[in-house]
């Protein structure tokens, strides 16, 4: 197995809806691109409310319908070491950006970005939290995350010099 060249950490509030969805989608895209042995993906929350829990069942259900598996993921809190280890720490919204900035060491500030900066089709600053809403919110999260992860995959390919053209 090759050494890990690049690490990504996805961040939302509780690490049970948006960030594990992004984690699962990106993991799948990296596997399809032949980069899963070179790029490591993780996710975390700015709060530890759900630490150790699997993703929200609704997130799992909607992701599974699109071919993404999230059941093995467990919520955890964002730590300083995530900024030290990851080349990119990708937050879902402005509140989580502010909370992550408070935790992020100054020398790693450039690693902190919003996931939607990588969107190609959608023009939105954030991935909204679907937790209190219905099925349409979870589908919208998947639409945004898939779009952003396509753009992110191209970015990662450029960084690691990787495997084949974009799909």
Image (cartoon, rainbow, N blue to C red):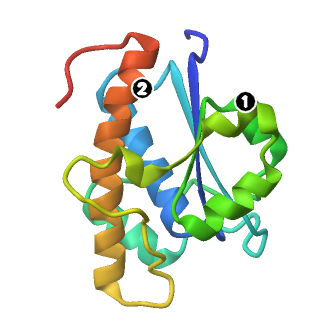
- Residue 84 visible in the picture: yes
Q: How many marks?
A: 2
Q: Which residue is mark 1?
A: 85
Residue 25: percent from left, percent from top: 38, 49
SS of the residue at dot 2? helix
Badge 2: few (under 14), some or many (20 or more) residues near its Cα, within 10 Å? many
Residue 85: percent from left, percent from top: 72, 30
Q: Is residue 55 above or below residue 67?
A: below
Residue 58: percent from left, percent from top: 43, 78
Quarter of the rendering containing residue 150: top left
Q: Is residue 162 above or below residue 88?
A: above
For the point 66% across and 32% down, the residue is 86
- Which residue is more in the foreground, 90 or 32? 90
Quarter of the rendering containing residue 163: top left
On the picture, is 163 further left or further right than 6? left
Residue 72: percent from left, percent from top: 57, 54
Q: Which residue is mark 2?
A: 156
Badge 1: few (under 14), some or many (20 or more) residues near its Cα, within 10 Å? some
Q: Quadrant of the N terminus?
A: top right
């Amino acid at each position: 197995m090759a050494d890990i060249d690049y690490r990504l950490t996805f961040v939302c509030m509780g690490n049970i809806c948006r960030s594990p969805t992004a984690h699962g989608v990106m993991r799948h895209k990296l596997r399809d691109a032949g980069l899963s042995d070179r790029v490591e993906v993780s996710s975390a929350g700015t709060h530890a409310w759900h630490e150790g829990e699997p993703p929200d069942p609704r997130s799992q259900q909607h992701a599974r319908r699109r071919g993404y598996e999230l059941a093995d993921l467990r919520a955890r809190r964002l730590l300083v070491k995530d900024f030290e280890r990851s080349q990119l720490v990708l937050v879902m919204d402005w509140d989580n950006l502010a909370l992550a900035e408070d935790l992020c060491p100054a020398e790693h500030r450039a690693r902190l970005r919003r996931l939607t900066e990588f969107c190609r089709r959608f023009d939105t600053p954030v991935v909204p939290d679907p937790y209190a809403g219905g099925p349409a919110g979870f589908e919208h999260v998947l639409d945004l995350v898939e779009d952003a992860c396509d753009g992110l995959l191209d970015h990662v390919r450029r960084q690691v010099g990787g495997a084949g053209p974009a799909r």
